[in-house]
Image: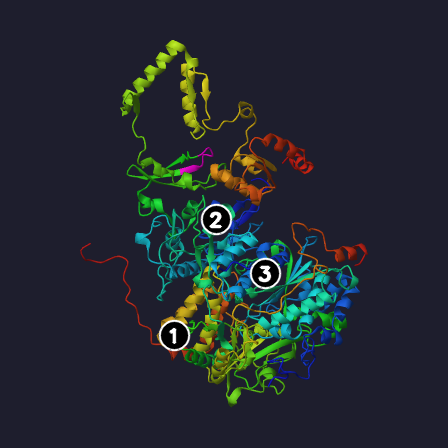
Amino acid sequence: MTSFPWAPGFIEGDRPQIVTSRFQYEDSFTLERYLATGGYDGLRSALARSPQDMHEEVRSSTLLGRGGAGFPAGVKWGLTPEGVYPRYLVVNGDESEPGTYKDRLLMERDPHQLIEGCLIACYAAGLSQCFLYIRGEMALAQERVATALNDAYAAGYIGKNILGSAFSLDIVLHWGAGAYVVGEETALIESLEGNRGMPRLKPPYFPAAIGLYGQPTIVNNVETLSNLPFIASKGAAEYTAIGTESSPGTRMVAVSGHVRRPGVYEIINGTTTFRDLLYGEEFCQGIRDGNDLKAFVPGGGSAPWFLPDQLDLPFEGRLVGAAGSMLGSGAIMVMDSTTDIPSAALTLTKFYAHESCGKCVPCREGGTWLMRILDRVVEGHGTTDDLDLLLEVGESICPGDMPHAASAELQLEATPFPYKMTTICFVGPSAYVPVHSALTLFRSEFEARVAPSRSRTRIPVTAVGGDS
Amino acid sequence: MARLTDANVSIAKEIIARYPRAKSALIPLLHLAQEQDGWVTDEAMRHIAELIGVTPAEVLGTGTFYEMFKFEPVGKYLINVCGTMSCALLGADELMRAAEEELGIHEGGTTDDGMFTLHRAECQAACTEAPCLQVNYRFKFRATPVEVRQLISDLRSGRLQDEIPPHGTLARVRQHIPADRGVGAVDPADVTEPPAWISAASQGGAS
Amino acid sequence: MSEQSVEITVNGKTVSAKPGEMVIAAAERAGDFIPRFCYHPRMSSVGMCRQCLVEIDTGRGPMLQPSCMVPVSPGMTVDTESETTKRAQEGILELLLANHPLDCPVCDKGGECPLQDQAFSHGPGESRYIEEKRHYEKPIEISSLIMLDRERCVLCDRCTRFADEVAGDPLIHFVERGNATQVMTYPDEPFSSHFSGNTAQICPVGALTAKPYRFKARPWDLEQVNSTCTSCSVGCEISVHSSRDQVLRYQGIDNDDVNWGWLCDRGRFNFESIHAEGRVTEPLIKTADGHQATSWNAAMSITTDLLKSALESTGPSSIGVIGGARGTNEDAWAWAQLCSALGIDRRDPQLGDGLPAALLGMPRATIREMASASTVVLMAPDLKEELPVLYLRLRDAVVNGSTKIIEFTSTGSGLTRHAWRSVRHGAGDISDVVTATLADPDVQSQLSDAG
C-alpha cells in the first residue's frame, strides 16, 4: 500500500519532491542522512546573502502558507512593524484538523528539513527566538525533533554564531497538550504563554504586530517552513517553475475515507484535480469496492462539502473558493454511496463542538446546541422543525449566505466562500459547516429520518376569561 | 506525595530558563508532573505554581483546558480510539466495541486492576491509516477488532513493555540546549534592538 | 466641539466621540445603548460575549463587529438597528438563554439583571431550546462571602478579569473547556480577596451573589441614597440600599476621582455592623454603678453642663476635641463650627493617624494626581490591608500607566511585586534607609523625571 513501511501513508510518485525527497530513506531523520543529501545547504546559501535578499527570494517564490489559510509566507514576514524588536517565530506543529496528515510525517521523517526552514525564516525576517510547538499527542514526532535539535546544536547549526556567522538562534521545543483550537495562530500564542488556548481578537491582535508576549510574531506551518531549504538553495525560479502562477510549487495532500488507496501524496499545486486524486492511477485509484462517490470534503473538516459535480476542479485556491469551499490544510475525506450522511455530519459537528474553547457565546452554546439537535435527528427523535432549527441556530453563528457547492441534480448554484461569522474564530462556524452542507446537498436523507412537525399549541400572552 | 522530585525540579528549572516568561513553562511542567505520577496531582499543581510564580488556580485553569492532562488516576495504558470522520467512516465504532468487550469496561472507564483506561479521542492526524488508535500516544494503524484484542493481550502480558512506556511518558528523548551553544531566552524587557545579524546587514549598506 | 473629537455617524445622526473611545461607549453617550455582557468600562475589553455586535462601516461596507473592541475613526458609520444587527443580537441572547436556568423567581438578580433586561429589549420572544440544560451543583461557596451558581453563569469573564486585572488576586479562573467551562477556585483555596464583593456587583446575572444580601430583598423595594463609606479615609462613594428602614447593602458608585465603582469587602459589608449585637444604640452615662442608659435629651443636658462648667472654671484651653480621619468632611466641619463657637483651639482631627504637623502643612495630592505621577514614594502600612481601594488605584497606575513606586516597608506589602524599588527597613532605621536610597543615582534620576 504505502511506499515505505517507515512512512505510513506516504505514497511516492513520479512527481517533483520538494519536501518528501528523503522519505525513501529509512534513516531519513538522522543528521548523517540529512547532510549526505544536501542538508543545510539552504542555510549556507541564506547566510551568504543579506537577510533582506533572502526575504526577497521567499517573497518572489510566492510560497503560500500550508496551515489552512494559504497566506503568502514572504508577505507575512513583511507585516512586522518597523523597528519593533524582539520578534519571534512560532512553528505551528499542532496538526489536528480532521483529515489532515502531513505535518506529523514531515516531523517524524525529516525533522532537520523543518529545522533548516526555521533557521532560514528567522535569519531572513530578523526573528530572535524560535518556538517549535508540536502537538502533545505526537510522541514519536517529539522524539525525532528533540534528537534532531540536539544533534544540530552539537554540530553548530543552531545556537550562538551559527556556522561562524553573526546569526544566533535558539530553537525551543514546546509540547502541546491536546486542544484542536490551539492550531489557530493566536490561540497557539496564548498556549505558548502558558494560558488556556483561547484565540485573541483580530484586530487588534494580529500576531505580526502584537503576538507572543506582545511582540511581533510570525506563525508558520511545518510544511510551509519545510519548503524553505529548497527555495534557499535552488532559488525561487525553480520553485515557481512547478505548479501555476497563483498556486506554485507542490503541496502535501492526504486523501482518506472510502477510496481504494488512501494516502499522503506530494502533488503539483494548481493543476492536479480532485478527479486525478480520487481516481488517478498514481493516486487513490477510485472508490472502494466499486461503489459510487457520494460526496467529499475537499479541505479538512472545516470545509463545505463537494459533490461529484466538482471533481474537475484543480487544486487552486480561488477556483475552489468560487465553487463554494476551500483548500484548507490539504485534507480530502471521501464518502461513498454507503455513507449515512446525517451520521457523517454528526461526527464532524461533534468534533468542533467538543473542541470549542468556550470563549465566545455562538460557538460555545451554538456548537453544542447543533450537536444535540443533530444527535436527536440521527437517533430518530427529530422532526422537520428540527431541520429548520438547525439552519436557524446556524444563522446565529454564520449570518447571511453560507457557502456551498453547486448541484446539477438539485439545480443549485454555488455560493462562494467565505462565510461571515459572529464568532471570534472559525471553530464555531466549522461546527455548522458540515450540517449546512449535508442539509443543503442531501436534505432528502434527513427528511426520511425525521417525523413530520407537530404544530405546538401557542399560549396567548393575555389570559382570556377565567377568574383573574 | 507528588510534589516534583529533586531530579524533576532540575529539569523544570532548565525548561523554565528557555522561555522569556516563566509562565510559558506551565504546560511542559504539567507534562513533567504527569510523567512522574501517571496523572496530575493537586500537590504537583501547587508545586508548579510556586516554581513559576502563579496561583494554583491559574495552573488548574490552564491544565483543565487540555485533553491530555488527567486529574484523576488513569490506567497504566491509556487507549484512545479515534472517532473522527475518516476513522468513523472506516469502522471506529467496531474497534471501540471490541476494546470494550475485551477489557470489560465502557468507553471512559478504567479496568479494576488499573491497567487500562479506554477513551474515544479526536482526530489523531493519521487519517489515511484509518481506523486507528493510540496507546499512550503510540500509534496502531489500520486496526481491526482482532488486532485490538491481540494488542490488549500483548499489553497485559508485558510483551510491549519496551515499545510503550506507562501513561505520562511522551517523548523519551528530551531537548537539551548545551550551555556553551545556547543563546538564552530573548526577553522583551531586556531586548529592544534588532538582532545582531540584522544590524550587521544594515550597517553593511545592504539594500 | 474641540479639535480633539472624532466625528462618527450612529443610526444616521452625527456623534462627536473622543479619540480612542470604543464605539460602544460613544454610542451609549449619544443615547444609543448597545447590549453587552463582557464589556465593563473600568476593565479591558475582551470582545467575548459577542452581544455588542453591530454593523460598522469604515469604508468597506457594513460589517458586524464587536463595538466594545472597535475604536472610533473619522467618517465611521454605525448602525445598531439594522436587520442584520438585530438578528445577531437576538441570536446571541437566544444562545445565552439556551443553558440558562429559569431561576428568576428565586434569583437575587431579578429586577436588576442585565440578562433579563437585554433579553426583553433585544432578544427573541421565545427560546426554541428543548434539549437538556447544563447542570452543576448549585450554588457553591467560593469564599465566606460569595456564592457561585455555575448554571446561571454566562461565562462573561468579568469576575475572573476583575480578580486578575484589577485586584491582582487571580484566585478564580475558568476551568475545563468549551461548553463545560466553569468559573472555579483551586480546591481548598477560596476566593479570599479583599475585593471579592465587587464580583457580585459586576456579575451581569445572578451567578455570583453576596451572602449578606442573599434572599433579603427585591431591587424594586429598595430605597437608594448616595453616600460615603466610613471604613477608612479613602471615602469611596457608595449607594446605601435600604428597605423598611433596614440597610440591606452597599453598592459601589463610579466616582472618577476616588474609587471607580470599586469597594473593598470591609467597607462594602460594614453595614452589617449597624444591626450588630452589642452595638451601642443609646447614650450611656458613667455612674458609680457603671454605665447607665439614658435619653438623648438627658445626655445633651449633661454634656452642655460639663462644657459650661469647664469654660467658666478653666477656660476654653482646658477643652480638647479629638476627631478621626474616618469621619466625613461634613462631620469635621460641624465639629469645627462648634469649637469656633466655643473658642476651643485644641483640636486634633486625626485620631490614631499620628502624622507630624510639619508633614500636614505640605502640599496635598489628590488620588488622581497620585495615579498620574511618574513616581510615588510609599511610606505607609500595607495599602492593600489599610486603604484597599487606594491600593487598587495605585496598582492600576503602575500596571496600566507609567507610574513607578519606591516603597519603604519592613515586611513587604501587597504592592511589593509592583514596586520599581522595594526597600526594606528595620525598626527605627527608616530615616537612614531613606537617606541611603535617595543617594542612589538611579533613584535620583527617576525622581527628577518629574511628570
Q: How is the image coloured?
A: rainbow
> A128 above or below A411?
above
Which structural element holds mark 1?
A: helix
> A222 above or below C338?
below
State how far apart marks 1 and 3 are (Cα).
54 Å
Q: Position of residue B141 (x, y in %)?
A: 54, 80
Q: Which tag is nearer the camera, tag 3 or tag 2?
A: 3
Nearest the eye: B186 or C425: C425
Residue A160 inside the magenta-drawn segment? no
State how far apart marks 2 and 1 are (Cα).
43 Å
Q: Position of residue C120 (x, y in %)?
A: 37, 54
Q: Which residue is mark 3?
A: B7
Badge 3 density bin: few <14, some 14–19, many ≥20, Cα 10 Å: few
Badge 2 density bin: few <14, some 14–19, many ≥20, Cα 10 Å: many
Q: Position of residue A57 (x, y in %)?
A: 74, 67
Q: Position of residue C170 (x, y in %)?
A: 49, 50
Instruction: Kindly identify which chain the residue marked by label 3 belongs to.
Output: B
Range drawn in magenta: C232-238
Q: Which residue is mark 2?
A: C163
Q: Quadrant of residue A200?
A: bottom right
A440 displayed left or right of A112: left
Instruction: Kindly identify which chain the residue marked by label 1 belongs to.
Output: A
Q: Quadrant of the N terminus of chain A?
A: bottom right
Which structural element holds mark 2?
A: helix
Which structural element holds mark 3?
A: helix
Main SS class of the magenta portion in the image: loop
